[in-house]
Image (cartoon, helix red, strand yellow):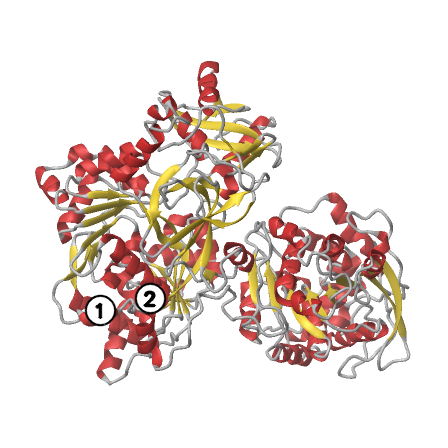
């Protein structure tokens, strides 16, 4: 096979010379005025070739603007400059609006697109070999020189930003490293610069390189082109496919497609291998800003190639577009992302040298681009100039003076202590640290837990786990999970916690996206890892028969690690230096209730700050017994010095938790604090009749009871509190990115309800509230955005769930919505302003993992030098400083009459006796959306149908504004982790289909 690949070019059919031409008119999205032809002399040869390229320079000249720089775009195989049409349009529109002007030059490489076909004449490659009869084959080194010949002919001057995709990414990087005097930055879409000699190339390319297949699949027929175009998500329209096919209608025009495939340097002796290696190593020295935009569904350039690029350019910004694939330029709005990055990282510095048009707005259309990327509002300053960007790929944490004297001094300066602090302090204590309730109660002392953590830590170091390595934990809540987690963080490894509550598809996306170096798992997790190809070296918490261990690629067991670790400790080996507060500690995943689960990176200092927040708010600390019906809080028990237990339940199905299981967990550790999710709480209350006198006695000792994860009704909280009569009931508000932001007690909820009931704006409507708290008016749910200086009403009419005031270390602000539903307002504490909820605390996450755009949006408008996070929740503060949550930003409805947030209408609908639960969604385009109510009835419906007219009329009357349809379903879709967050986005898509004539199926 090596010989076949090394001589692949010789198996390409002959092609004839074809001169460069302009594309035909009428190609979708391609403006004829962009096209131009350039004759370019080939360096080292007497030949010259015609190039076709797209160039918006003449349009910028017509606008009278001076570009701040040039974006040089290089396509891959089998596309052409048509790939970049979106960027040319977006850059030109932005310049027209007054934003920094970028000239975009998108080339058709020789033998590709509408550039010349160089024919079958014999010509020498980089090694001096002759390639007779191999039309379209130009080795990598020649293509890099070709691009340099073109830019010389164009007399291109800096600053230049390169942008490449597929094989064009390598060519663009070759040009970049050869032209440092012109280079200002690099941007890449799915590509690769290194192929390890021992690794197989992707299967589609192996197939295309096969003997008897290369020529027929790539040149004689359009099969390779058709296969590539089929990789788009969603599928390309016929018009766009026609655009991509336009230059490749005959075999004579497809020689370059086969040539590119033949030039894949699989074998070490391939003539392009030295050039690829040269570029790959030279990339390490690039000190210019870099942006990597990636489609993870790419069967060719998988995340392992992204990992390699990040290792070579650790300063690069990275964004993975979940759901996108190889044709990222078609799957996602890469153009908006590129222009935003350029505005942040490069344009501000370059604008200093461009005086023409200085009176125009420097943001211009980039504000609109922000909105397209889900981040409406003005750009914030970030990393201007040509210096390397921070390796964390995130906005800076609160500014802190450098601390000298090692980790101990850093922890002292941070005012907290490491997560393993109490494991050291209590290492000789025989008091209970935690209890496993499954399969039978098992008590673990602090002494044993501390010893196990040290043994596992030493064992992990022995098998090669180093600081910064990622370790995915696929272990159910247990003593094993706790010990492994604390061992990992102690040695500086980064734990990846993607719980099974995400569901198998979500868990697969999470683990693959996090790219762990090691996977520690129980049988179900390891079998899933094997079946679905999850990355990482495998370690099992249990022993398997040798054949099964080989099948699952298990290298070590937890017992083996303990033995290895104990041997190393007895030999005098020391554990690595303790991580510092700013070192990354964990990647946690959001629930995925409003889209794909996002990886959230926490530092050691931030996780310790979570522990401190729990201590300050609820007094959870040494001597506290903590029952955690939500696994992440159980894992924090040792960090707090508290004894902890997870009740007997299926963590993927919170509704499986029973009252007797809670009572047993409380009794097992003499618990004083209980934390349960709302979904679990429903079944706990429903099964309370099974409690024995002993159970009641155990529950009577609970002092604080918490429930969080989704909105919870006052009545449900009251029923649960009745089971724990000595406890103060709390409903904390938070998210994966900030676990404890606000808090309210049951008494506080009742006080908030009373304040609403006393308001003349609400009147009798509030008296009907028997479910979630509401502040809604019966006349309208639209949110008015008051003009500056306008008198505000005493009660916000939008409704919402009161989640109380900010916790001890948290600040909460609101960014007001505009008429389009975008959160564009300055951060404010002013009461009765509906907008996006923005929080700041020491325990807010550090950054999103490889989601630069998402991270950028979450920091937008933040106070310089402080860590703020846009939650994606919408709500308002009342006059007492309490926060009311009105829904999620993606669920805001924008009708012709104004903006509506969903929780208020849902609350009013749920006051109806025939309604159990409701969702309120928008259907149609923003600005003209129609409001639709989707409800569960009492008793439950057996099928999907329109509500009977009396019920529909009652719903419309309760809402108080036009409702286009009232649909009844057997059950509303909820997230997997909490079983309680309604998936309104899914319901909106479903309702759109139903109202458009689709089959009446369950959502």
Name the mark nearer the viewer: 2 or 1. 1
Q: Nearer the viewer, residue 828 or 972?
A: 828
**Callout 1: SS:** helix
Q: Which mark is residue 247?
A: none
Q: Which mark is residue 423?
A: 1
**Picture quarter containing residue 415?**
bottom left
Q: Please provide percent x and percent y for residue 95.
A: 74, 56
Q: Nearer the viewer, residue 587 or 777?
A: 777
Q: Nearer the viewer, residue 909 or 453?
A: 909
Q: Please provide percent x and percent y for residue 581.
A: 36, 70
Q: Is residue 517 above or below residue 956?
A: below
Dot 1: few (<14), some (14–19), or many (≥20) neighbours within 10 Å?
many
Instruction: Measure how far apart labels 2 and 1 are at the Cα level.
Output: 35 Å
Quarter holding the N terminus?
Answer: bottom right
Dot 2: few (<14), some (14–19), or many (≥20) neighbours within 10 Å?
few
**Left or right: where 903 falls relative to 42:** left
Q: Is residue 138 above or below residue 25?
A: below
**Left or right: where 140 falls relative to 865:** right
Does label 2 or label 1 sit earlier along the sequence?
Answer: 1
Q: Please provide percent x and percent y for residue 806.
A: 35, 50
**Left or right: where 504 falls relative to 405:** right
- Point 30% across, 79% down: residue: 575
Q: Which mark is residue 546?
A: 2
Q: Please provide percent x and percent y for residue 359.
A: 73, 59
Q: Is residue 886 above or below residue 577?
A: above
**Callout 2: SS:** helix
- Point 37% across, 22% down: residue: 764
Q: Can the viewer see residue 687 in this picture?
A: yes
Q: Is residue 931 above or below residue 697?
A: above
Q: Can the viewer see residue 271 in this picture?
A: no
């Amino acid at each position: 096979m090596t010989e076949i690949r090394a001589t692949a070019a010789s198996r390409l059919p002959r092609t004839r010379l074809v001169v460069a031409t302009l594309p035909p008119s009428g190609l979708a999205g391609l403006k004829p005025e962009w096209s131009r032809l350039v004759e370019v002399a080939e360096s080292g040869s007497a030949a010259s070739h015609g190039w076709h390229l797209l160039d918006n320079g003449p349009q910028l000249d017509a606008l009278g603007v001076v570009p701040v720089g040039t974006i040089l775009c290089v396509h891959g195989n089998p596309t052409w400059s048509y790939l970049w049409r979106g960027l040319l349009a977006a850059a030109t529109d932005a310049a027209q609006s007054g934003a920094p002007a970028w000239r975009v030059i998108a080339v058709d490489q020789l033998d590709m697109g509408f550039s010349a076909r160089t024919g079958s004449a014999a010509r020498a490659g980089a090694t001096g070999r002759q390639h007779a009869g191999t039309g379209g084959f130009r080795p990598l080194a020649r293509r890099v020189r070709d691009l340099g010949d073109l830019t010389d002919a164009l007399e291109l001057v800096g600053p230049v930003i390169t942008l490449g995709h597929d094989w064009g990414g390598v060519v663009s990087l070759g040009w970049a490293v050869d032209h440092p005097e012109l280079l200002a930055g690099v941007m890449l879409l799915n590509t690769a610069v290194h192929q390890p000699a021992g690794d197989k190339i992707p299967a589609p390319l192996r197939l295309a390189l096969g003997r008897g297949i290369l020529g027929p699949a790539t040149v004689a027929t359009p099969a390779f082109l058709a296969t590539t175009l089929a990789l788009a998500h969603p599928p390309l329209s016929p018009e766009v496919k026609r655009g991509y096919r336009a230059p490749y209608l005959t075999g004579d025009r497809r020689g370059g497609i086969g040539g590119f495939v033949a030039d894949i340097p699989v074998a070490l002796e391939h003539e392009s291998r030295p050039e690829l290696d040269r570029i790959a190593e030279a990339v390490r020295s690039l000190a210019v800003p870099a942006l990597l935009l990636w489609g993870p569904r790419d069967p060719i350039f998988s995340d392992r190639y992204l990992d390699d690029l990040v290792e070579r350019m650790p300063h690069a910004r990275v964004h993975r577009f979940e759901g996108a694939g190889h044709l990222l330029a078609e799957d996602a709005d890469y153009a908006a992302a590129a222009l935003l990055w350029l505005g942040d990282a490069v344009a501000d510095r370059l604008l200093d040298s461009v005086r023409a048009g200085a009176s125009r707005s420097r943001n211009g259309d980039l504000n609109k681009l922000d909105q397209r990327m889900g981040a409406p509002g003005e750009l914030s300053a970030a990393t201007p100039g040509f210096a390397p960007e921070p390796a964390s790929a995130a906005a800076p944490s609160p500014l802190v003076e450098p601390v000298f004297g090692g980790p101990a001094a850093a922890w002292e300066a941070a005012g907290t202590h490491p997560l393993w602090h109490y494991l050291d302090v209590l290492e000789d204590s025989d008091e209970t640290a935690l209890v496993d309730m499954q399969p039978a109660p098992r008590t673990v002392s602090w002494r044993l837990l501390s010893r196990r953590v040290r043994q596992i830590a030493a064992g992990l170091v022995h098998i090669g786990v180093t600081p910064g390595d990622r370790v995915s934990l696929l272990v159910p809540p247990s003593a094993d999970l706790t010990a492994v987690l604390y061992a990992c963080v102690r040695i500086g490894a980064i734990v990846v916690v993607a719980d099974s509550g995400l569901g198998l598809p979500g868990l697969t996306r999470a683990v693959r996206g996090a790219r762990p170096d090691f996977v520690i798992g129980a049988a179900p997790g390891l079998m899933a890892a094997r079946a679905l190809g999850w990355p990482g070296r495998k370690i099992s918490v249990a022993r398997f028969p040798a054949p099964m261990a080989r099948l699952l690629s298990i290298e070590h067991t937890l017992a083996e690690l303990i033995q290895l670790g104990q041997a190393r400790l007895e030999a005098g080996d020391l554990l690595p230096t303790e991580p510092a507060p700013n070192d990354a500690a964990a990647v946690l995943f959001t629930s995925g209730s409003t889209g794909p689960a996002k990886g959230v990176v926490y530092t050691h200092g931030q996780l310790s700050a979570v522990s401190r927040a729990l201590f300050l708010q609820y007094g959870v600390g040494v001597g506290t017994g903590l029952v955690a019906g939500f696994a992440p809080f159980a894992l924090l028990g040792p960090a707090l010095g508290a004894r902890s237990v997870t009740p007997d339940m299926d963590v993927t199905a919170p509704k499986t938790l029973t009252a007797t299981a809670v009572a047993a967990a409380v009794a097992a550790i003499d618990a004083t604090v209980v934390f349960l999710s709302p979904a679990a709480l429903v079944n706990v209350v429903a099964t309370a009749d099974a409690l024995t006198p002993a159970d009641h006695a155990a529950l009577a000792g609970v002092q604080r009871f918490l429930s969080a994860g989704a909105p919870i009704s006052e009545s449900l909280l009251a029923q649960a509190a009745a089971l724990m009569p000595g406890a103060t009931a709390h409903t904390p508000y938070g998210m994966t990115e900030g676990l404890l932001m606000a808090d309210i007690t049951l008494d506080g909820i009742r006080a908030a309800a009373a304040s609403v009931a006393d308001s003349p704006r609400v009147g009798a409507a509030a008296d009907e509230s028997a479910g979630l708290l509401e502040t809604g008016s019966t006349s309208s749910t639209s949110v008015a955005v008051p003009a500056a200086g306008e008198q505000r009403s005493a009660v916000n009419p939008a409704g919402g769930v009161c989640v109380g005031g900010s916790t001890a270390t948290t600040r909460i602000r609101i960014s007001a919505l505009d008429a389009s539903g975008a959160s564009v307002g300055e951060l404010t504490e002013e009461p009765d302003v509906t907008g996006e909820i923005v929080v700041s605390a020491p325990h807010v996450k550090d950054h999103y993992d490889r989601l630069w755009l998402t991270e950028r949006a979450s920091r937008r408008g933040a106070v310089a030098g402080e860590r703020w996070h846009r939650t994606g929740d919408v709500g308002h503060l009342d006059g007492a400083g309490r926060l009311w949550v009105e829904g999620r930003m993606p669920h805001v409805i924008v009708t012709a009459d104004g903006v509506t947030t969903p929780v208020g209408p849902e609350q009013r609908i749920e006051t109806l006796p025939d309604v159990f639960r409701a969702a309120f969604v928008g259907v149609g385009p923003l600005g003209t959306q129609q409001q639709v109510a989707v409800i569960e009835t009492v008793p439950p419906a057996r099928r999907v149908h329109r509500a009977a007219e009396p019920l529909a009329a009652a719903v419309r009357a309760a809402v108080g504004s036009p409702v286009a349809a009232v649909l009844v379903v057997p059950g509303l879709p909820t997230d997997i982790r909490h079983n309680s967050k309604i998936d309104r986005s899914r319901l909106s898509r479903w309702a759109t289909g139903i109202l458009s004539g689709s089959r009446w199926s369950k959502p």
